[in-house]
Amino acid sequence: MCARIIAAKQRTSVAGHSPSALLSDVNHALDPVLERAFAERDPKRPRRTRAVVIVQNGRIVAERYAPGFTPETPLIGWSMTKTVINALVGILVKDGRLAVNRPAPVPEWQSADDPRGSITLDQLLRMSSGLEFDESAWNPVSDVTVMLLGRPDAGLYAARKSLAAAPGTVWRYSSGTTNIISRALRTVIRSSTMARMSG
């Protein structure tokens, strides 16, 4: 279930007013904000805004969608997904299935002579893994472009990158590390599920 639907279910009546009436009042007050979000001021640099949902105290107070898009339309989260991935790591750490200060569970790094084997999950989360990664989104052959648009397994592509610096010594924004974490999470969750099914 998407977050937008969950938030919509949390709308409640206040002082005898229906949730839809309250939303209408607030939405009207935020109309200028929504107008700005969807305005195309420069045809040479279009924004292409597809959806805006404003949440306050866990409740949707305004939302608008571009033509052809609805609350049910799946949209790529891009870098917002990093927050979700980090939250999932926190859940698995709390459950004892991951440890942030131990080497990350990446199969490609398990060779005894592979220096990437010392990269911790914490370093991946902090984007200080030291892995080589070009995040130039405007470059059609940069790592981030190739990874997201030209490879079936983004996490594997990023995991195969070489070290450019010692782990923990250099910060570099990298969508690659998030995809490595995502791949590791799938492995951990899949292993736990298989163990429960066989037990």
Image: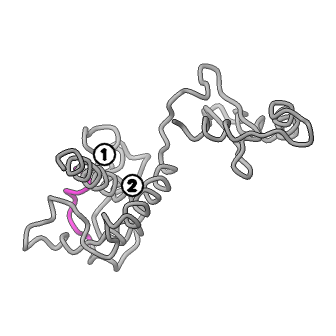
Quarter of the figure with residue 175 = bottom left
Q: Residue 41: x, y in percent? A: 72, 35
On the image, numbered disc 2 is attached to which residue? 175
Vertical position of residue 190 compared to residue 6: above or below? below
**In screen coordinates, is 150 left or right of 195?**
right
Mark linked to residue 147? 1
Q: What amino acid type is highlighted by mark number 2? A: Ser
Residue at 19% from the left image edge and 56% from the top image edge:
160
Residue at 54% from the left image edge and 27% from the top image edge:
73
Is residue 157 visible to the viewer in this orientation of the structure? no
User: Range of the magenta residues?
Assistant: 156-164
**Crowding at label 2, few (<14), some or many (≥20) Cα neighbours within 10 Å?**
many
Vertical position of residue 91 compared to residue 186: above or below? below
Count of labels in the image? 2
Q: Is residue 162 magenta?
A: yes
Circles 1 and 2 in contact, beta carbons < 8 Å: yes
